[in-house]
């Protein structure tokens, strides 16, 4: 057997083993996330805004298509679709006949918020590190990643994002910002 | 071999002229002002418009495109150039990408939201309106946009700040890619930059320095294959002068070669070329010096046009040298032909003096250039040339037999003159000559530069301004109040759909009076607290949720209104306001710019209702066309007066008293006919006449006058004399054609027009002068011609 073929075989074996049998590293997790071409899930979210006497709940579905398409469709209590694709972000609320579209390049304050979720799903560590200080560690069965904005002006609006996951799945996103604390729970669709 | 003394004197004269030329062009300032290229205005609206074109806010604007590289590279270059421009400190505004409010500016605007926002009204703070706003806020908090709403919504539940920013959004057509502006409709990616220089539009040096910063920043960024295109009034004057200089240089070299070849063919002497160069150079230097003395500087464009026009001075030495009789010295010839030569040159110069009075700076410079150049050229020819050429003999070669026979038949063939009434009929059928009505085409700014400017402007979404409302006042406050009055008058037109909308300085900076009125509308914190509680009933807002709003209301009532002096702290606001509100010579000026105006009459009526003489409607298209028409008719008037004066001069020169008039008319007839033929040919060629065409017509008339005078004067002096004169006039015609015919191929439209006009005019004048001159003895066959 030539050395070339041997290397190929070893490589094939390496890919055949499940990604999480090895120890959970940031790079390994990112690679695993990057290998997911598409996924869909349901979510339930709770926003705790300090000025409000009760949290605001919402539920809906999430769908992801690599490399950069994310859709958050809220079905309760209002129908709203937030769609991100490349540089464009669109927000639609059919009930009010409202449609907003903006360029993420043009919105340096919004972009980091989008990338926290999108680049994590894409396993794009380089982009995450462009906006965040990333810390990572195993937590329970899975892993926990904390994102702290690098820019001071962003930190005024968004203090930190905590992402909990297991293997190549994101399970919980907790965002602390100037609109309080938002907890997003994600359940993979069957 | 010419005698040594001739070489010495001629060489010395040329050397002296060259030294003088170098010294002169070092000493006199060559200007490139846009101002000189614009005609004067004669109505208040036209004056305003031209002042704006010369020194208005628009003149400090530079537009640029970067292209011919991949998008990421263009974005990098755009950022580098943008940084270079901002660091130079020469620009009050540089826009090339996402233009964010700085935190400081946003905070300041947020603090002033209730004073600046158009939505501030007493109803906004009443319970019903509040209840609706609070419900909308809660709804927004549920949405994905909640971070934004949480940030501003509790401090501004009535949404005055969002309304304020919404009013500022322009209908920009640029696209943001890679963080910088790109043209939306370009076939190849083109990054766009807008910069407003600090310098006044009249400060040409500072404008040139600003353009240089642009180019230097670009060069420093390591552009590789990428190209930087810069446009804007700061570039125009310089570009026009440069383009004309390039054209003139090309024409000078080419026509010098052609004329040298022709003179060699006709005289077999290179010395002839040097002899012809002396009056030409002297005339050109005199022209430039006269303009510099009278105007303090020479415009690059006037210099270029003037040098080309003075090509006709070559005629004088040709006439002198060629008409020498075999037995004469050159000095004797000069004395003999001086009365005719003097009359011809004086008539040509007199014709051009009208241009000096036209009031159109570049035309006036051109006129003076021509007058001084012609007079000095003729003076040097008659006074100096014989001394420079003692004993030199230039024997013109006989005309080729075919030409000699042809001209012999033409001479006195009056039927040819029928072409003149024919031309008149054609011109009538065409409905007369067509006049240029586009101000842009009246200026010698190269077409390519104008196209670039138009394209960049469109890509940057600059509005196509049909007209504008100009407001003046002793201070910013007065102008802003006038702007608010105009807003009030125009608002009904917007709701009627007659007007799409308008941009007004008061939209960005309301007058102090309006800001105070808004302060007076704001309820006290106690009143507001009670209304908020009422409006928030049943909604999950905590009691202290709107503490920041209540504080802001109290604070807003004590704020000193924002005034023009505060703009230094507000770069984005200044950038929006800059073009609409400006100060010059202790006078403040504002512009309200309507867009999608569908009924000018309705707008004028609405403005008339204000009955304020400080509010002026400027119909841009009509006014610019009016300026062109006025300038053209003025030029036409001066040309007509010049023509009459020339006739008078001819009458005086050709005979005493009334008896001179028929002779003058007879001499002028071929010229008048030639002018008619020229105008007809130009009309047939689709040329729109400008004052420059008129100047060229005057010049052609002046040149043609030489022909008519000399052919007329020689007709009764015997065949040899007549033929010598014919040969001289033919040589003149050919050299003129070789110069001006070439102009028809150059890139500057004005030069092309001048070239075409003079070339056609000269041919027509030559042929008509020949056919209308008295028939003489049959021409000598070439072999019979006496050697001279």
Image (tube, coloured by chain):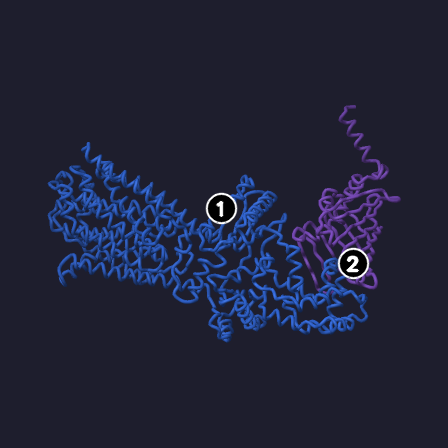
Dot 2 and dot 1 residues touching (CB under 8 Å): no
Q: Where residue B243 sits: x, y (%)?
A: 41, 47
Q: Nearer the viewer, residue B555 or B6?
A: B555
Residue B561: percent from left, percent from top: 61, 66
Question: Drawn colour of chain B?
Answer: blue
Instruction: Look at chain A in the picture and name its colour.
Output: purple
Q: Position of residue B102 (x, y in %)?
A: 64, 55
Q: Is residue A143 left or right of residue B551?
A: right
* Residue A131 shown left or right of residue B279 in the figure: right
Horizontally, residue B476 falls left or right of residue B242, namely right
Residue at position x 46%, y 72% in the image: B613
Of all chains, the one bearing label 1 is: B
For the N terminus of chain B, give its image quadrant: top left
Query: Any mark on residue B212, and which?
Result: 1
Mark 2 belongs to which subunit? A
Give the labeled residue for mark 2: A74
- The quadrant of the image that shows the C terminus of chain B is top left
Q: Is residue B693 above or below residue A120?
A: below
């Amino acid at each position: 057997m030539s050395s070339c073929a041997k290397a190929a075989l070893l490589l094939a074996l390496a890919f055949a083993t499940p990604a999480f049998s090895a120890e959970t590293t940031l790079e390994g997790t990112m690679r695993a996330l990057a290998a997911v071409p598409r996924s869909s899930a349901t979510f339930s979210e709770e926003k705790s805004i300090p000025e409000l006497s009760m949290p605001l709940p919402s539920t809906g579905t999430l769908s992801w298509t690599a490399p950069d398409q994310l859709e958050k469709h809220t079905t309760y209590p209002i129908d709203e679709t937030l769609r991100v694709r490349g540089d464009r972000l669109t927000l639609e609320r059919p009930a009010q006949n409202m449609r907003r579209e903006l360029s993420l390049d043009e919105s340096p304050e919004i972009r980091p918020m989008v990338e926290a979720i999108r680049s994590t799903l894409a396993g794009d560590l380089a982009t995450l590190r462009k906006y965040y200080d990333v810390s990572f560690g195993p937590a329970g069965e899975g892993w926990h990643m904390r994102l702290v904005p690098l820019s001071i002006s962003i930190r005024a609006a968004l203090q930190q994002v905590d992402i909990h996951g297991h293997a190549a799945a994101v399970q919980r996103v907790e965002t602390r910002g100037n609109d309080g604390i938002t907890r997003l729970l994600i359940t993979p669709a069957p | 071999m010419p005698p040594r003394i001739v070489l010495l004197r001629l060489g010395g004269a040329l050397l002296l002229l060259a030294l003088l030329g170098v010294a002169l062009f070092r000493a006199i300032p060559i200007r490139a002002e846009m101002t000189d290229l614009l005609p004067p205005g004669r109505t208040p609206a036209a004056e305003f418009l031209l002042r704006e074109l010369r020194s208005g806010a628009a003149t400090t604007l530079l537009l640029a495109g970067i292209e011919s590289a991949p998008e990421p590279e263009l974005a990098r270059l755009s950022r580098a150039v943008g940084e270079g421009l901002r660091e130079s400190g020469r620009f009050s505004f540089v826009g090339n990408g996402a233009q964010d409010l700085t935190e400081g500016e946003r905070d300041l605007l947020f603090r002033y939201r209730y004073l600046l926002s158009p939505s501030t009204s007493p109803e906004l703070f009443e319970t019903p309106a509040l209840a609706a706003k609070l419900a909308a806020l809660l709804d927004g908090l549920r949405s994905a946009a909640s971070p934004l709403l949480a940030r501003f919504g509790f401090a501004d539940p009535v949404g005055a700040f969002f309304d304020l920013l919404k009013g500022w959004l322009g209908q920009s057509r640029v696209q943001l890619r890679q963080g910088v502006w790109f043209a939306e409709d370009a076939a190849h990616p083109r990054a766009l930059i807008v910069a407003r220089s600090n310098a006044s539009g009249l400060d040409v040096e500072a404008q040139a320095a600003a353009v240089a910063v642009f180019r230097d920043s670009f060069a420093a960024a390591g552009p590789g294959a990428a190209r930087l295109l810069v446009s804007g009034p700061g570039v125009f004057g310089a570009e026009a002068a440069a383009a004309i200089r390039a054209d003139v240089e090309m024409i000078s070299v080419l026509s010098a070669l052609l004329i040298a070849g022709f003179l060699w063919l006709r005289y077999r002497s290179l010395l002839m070329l040097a002899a012809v160069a002396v009056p030409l150079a002297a005339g050109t230097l005199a022209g430039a010096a006269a303009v510099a003395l009278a105007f303090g500087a020479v415009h690059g464009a006037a210099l270029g046009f003037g040098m080309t026009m003075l090509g006709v001075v070559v005629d004088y030495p040709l006439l002198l040298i060629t008409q020498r009789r075999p037995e004469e010295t050159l000095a004797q010839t000069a004395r003999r032909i001086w009365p005719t030569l003097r009359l011809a040159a004086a008539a040509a110069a007199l014709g051009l003096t009208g241009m000096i009075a036209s009031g159109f700076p570049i035309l006036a410079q051109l006129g003076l250039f021509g007058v001084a150049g012609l007079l000095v050229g003729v003076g040097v020819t008659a006074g100096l040339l014989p001394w420079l050429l003692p004993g030199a003999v230039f024997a013109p070669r006989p005309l080729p037999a075919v030409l000699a026979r042809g001209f012999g038949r033409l001479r006195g063939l009056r039927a040819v003159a029928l072409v003149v009434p024919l031309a008149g009929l054609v011109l009538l059928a065409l409905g007369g000559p067509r006049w240029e009505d586009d101000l842009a085409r009246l200026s010698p700014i190269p077409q390519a530069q104008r196209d670039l400017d138009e394209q960049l402007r469109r890509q940057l979404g600059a509005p196509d301004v049909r007209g504008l409302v100009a407001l003046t006042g002793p201070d910013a406050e007065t102008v802003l109040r006038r702007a608010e009055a105009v807003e009030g008058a125009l608002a009904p037109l917007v709701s009627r759909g007659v007007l799409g909308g308008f941009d007004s300085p008061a939209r960005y900076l309301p007058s102090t009076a309006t800001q105070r009125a808004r302060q007076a509308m704001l309820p006290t914190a106690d009143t507001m607290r009670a209304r908020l509680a009422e409006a928030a009933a049943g909604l999950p807002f905590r009691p202290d949720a709107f503490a920041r709003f209540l504080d802001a209301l109290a604070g807003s009532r004590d704020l000193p209104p924002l005034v023009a002096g505060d703009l230094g702290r507000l770069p984005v606001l200044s950038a929006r306001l800059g073009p609409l509100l400006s100060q010059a010579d202790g006078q403040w000026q504002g512009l309200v710019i309507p867009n999608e105006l569908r009924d000018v009459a309705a707008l004028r009526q609405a403005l008339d209702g204000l009955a304020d003489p400080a509010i002026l409607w400027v119909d841009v298209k009509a006014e610019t066309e009016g300026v062109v028409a006025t300038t053209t008719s003025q030029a036409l008037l001066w040309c007509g007066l010049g023509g009459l004066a020339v006739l008078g001069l001819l009458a005086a020169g050709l005979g005493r008293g009334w008896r001179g008039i028929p002779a003058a008319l007879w001499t002028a007839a071929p010229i008048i006919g030639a002018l008619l033929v020229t105008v007809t040919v130009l009309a047939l060629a689709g040329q729109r006449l400008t004052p420059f065409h008129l100047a060229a017509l005057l010049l052609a008339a002046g040149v043609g006058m030489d022909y008519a005078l000399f052919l007329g004067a020689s007709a009764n002096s015997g065949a040899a004399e007549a033929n010598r004169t014919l040969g001289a006039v033919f040589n003149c015609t050919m050299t003129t054609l070789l110069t001006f015919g070439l102009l028809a191929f150059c890139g500057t439209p004005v030069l092309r027009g001048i070239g075409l006009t003079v070339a056609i005019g000269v041919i027509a004048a030559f042929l008509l002068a020949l056919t209308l001159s008295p028939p003489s003895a049959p021409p000598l066959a070439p072999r019979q011609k006496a050697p001279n």
